[in-house]
Amino acid sequence: MDLTNVDIVELAKQLRKPDGAVGEEVGRTMAHFNASAVAFTIECLHIQPKDHILEIGFGPGEAIAEAVRLTPRGYVAGIDHSPVMLEMAKQRNHRALMQEHVELTLGDAQELPYADDSFDTVFAVNVFHFWPDPTRELVECRRVLKPGGRIAFYLTHPSSWLPGIRDTGVFTSREADDVEKILLAAGFTNIETRATKTEPDGKGFVVMGKR
Ligand SMILES: C[S@@+](CC[C@H](N)C(=O)[O-])C[C@H]1O[C@@H](n2cnc3c(N)ncnc32)[C@H](O)[C@@H]1O
């Protein structure tokens, strides 16, 4: 399927919640185009072998696979509200699922189905800009993080977005210092940003904080 024929508003909605045959193609495309963003985010996280990790909005499941590889004595959970992405990520992480090293769940970031103080790290790649008011999501992230646990959000910089996507109303445009302020207001500490250097994949940044 050729995504260049898909209307830009429909494409933006598909990126927010992939659905149907178009959603499957969007998932395959994300696995390709977000590879460097996933690698950069994982590098920033300094994952340790025993860590318990949660990814919100795992899409096709590439970052989940990398987190699994880095946590031979740990545990990885993922949540995504798209049934199409759940199936794709399950296929990508079939062996880790069989070994109960990873658990993938259909659900929404506003209501995380995990106990308090569960994770060393909670992260999301290109998901934060779908949350116009992330108050509830961040309360949930704090709740499931262990004290001292790390939160990290990767966002493609708005200057590297697909032409026209800004005007669809589906994405909220935020600079790194906007995200820093939001995390501070939500009670996170030790806020820091790291920006990507890699062109031509586009500019992006990871904002991190601690509970
Ligand atoms: C642009 S894709 C990014 C996927 C993946 N992180 C990557 O980098 O390739 C956004 C993903 O977040 C999921 N998502 C968006 N909002 C969500 C929410 N509130 N709760 C759970 N999943 C969400 C979508 O279904 C989609 O799979």
Image: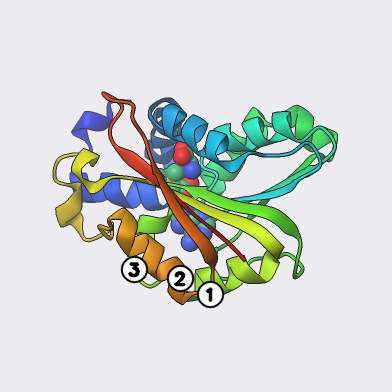
Q: Residue 160, located in which quarter of the rendered image?
A: top left
Return the mark for residue 187. Answer: 1
The 10 Å Cα crowd at callout 3, few under 14, some 14 to 19, many 20 or more, is few
Return the mark for residue 184. Answer: 2
Q: CB atoms at circles 2 and 1 under 8 Å apart?
A: yes
In the rendered view of the protein, which quadrant contains the N terminus?
Answer: top left
**Badge 3 element:** loop
Relative to 7, residue 120 above or below: below
Relative to 183, residue 207 above or below: above
Q: Position of residue 169 (x, y in %)?
A: 21, 61
Mark 2–mark 1 Cα distance, whole angstroms, equals 5 Å
Q: Amino acid at mark 1?
A: Gly
**Badge 1 element:** loop
Q: Position of residue 5 (x, y in %)?
A: 20, 32
Q: Amino acid at mark 2?
A: Leu
Q: Residue 167, located in which quarter of the rendered image?
A: bottom left
Instruction: Between label 2 and label 3, give the one nearer the viewer.
Output: 2
Any part of residue 10 in sight: yes
**Badge 2 element:** helix
The disc, 2 or 3, on the residue closer to the chain's N-terminal end is 3
Return the mark for residue 132. Answer: 3
Residue at x-position 59% and y-position 42%: 45
Residue at x-position 51% and y-position 30%: 39
